Amino acid sequence: MLIVHEVENYDAWKSVFDAAATIRRDAGELSYQVLADSSNATNIVHFSKWTSLAAARAFFESPELVRIRTEAGVQAPNFLYLDELEAGTLT
């Protein structure tokens, strides 16, 4: 799962994001990374692994998450539901 969105204030967004950790986990999120665009710190990328794409879609499209996004100051999120084809580590 990959989400790219603008936030009004990173610290305010992060506070809401952290507070939602339990509901994200209970919905099926297994792990996450949060990154910022190096040329625009309010452009946040949230990459996460889920138990299934169906679980991710149900969570991210739920009315509860719409409310949470509004509370967090998220603007125009772009959701990409991705199937992993390959992963690896280079040494």
Image (spheres, helix red, strand yellow):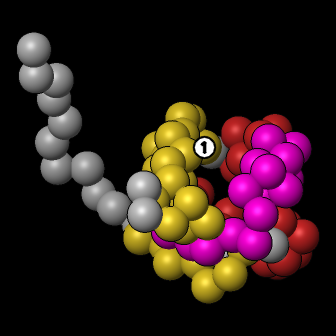
In the rendered image, residue 6 lying in the magenta stretch gets the answer: yes
Quarter of the picture holding the N terminus: bottom left
Q: Which residue is mark 1?
A: 29
Q: Secondary structure at mark 1?
A: strand
Residue 9: x percent and y percent?
Answer: 77, 63
Q: Is residue 71 left or right of residue 74?
A: right
Which of the two residues, 74 or 52, is positioned nearer the viewer here? 74
For residue 46, say whether it is visible. Answer: yes
Which of the two residues, 42 or 30, is positioned nearer the viewer here? 42
* Residue displayed at 85% across by 47% down: 15
Residue found at the very far bottom of the displayed protein: 76
In the rendered image, residue 53 lying in the magenta stretch gets the answer: no
* Residue displayed at 10% across by 22% down: 90
* Residue displayed at 78% across by 58% down: 13
Mark 1 is on which residue type?
Glu
Q: What segment is highlighted magenta in the picture? A: 1-20
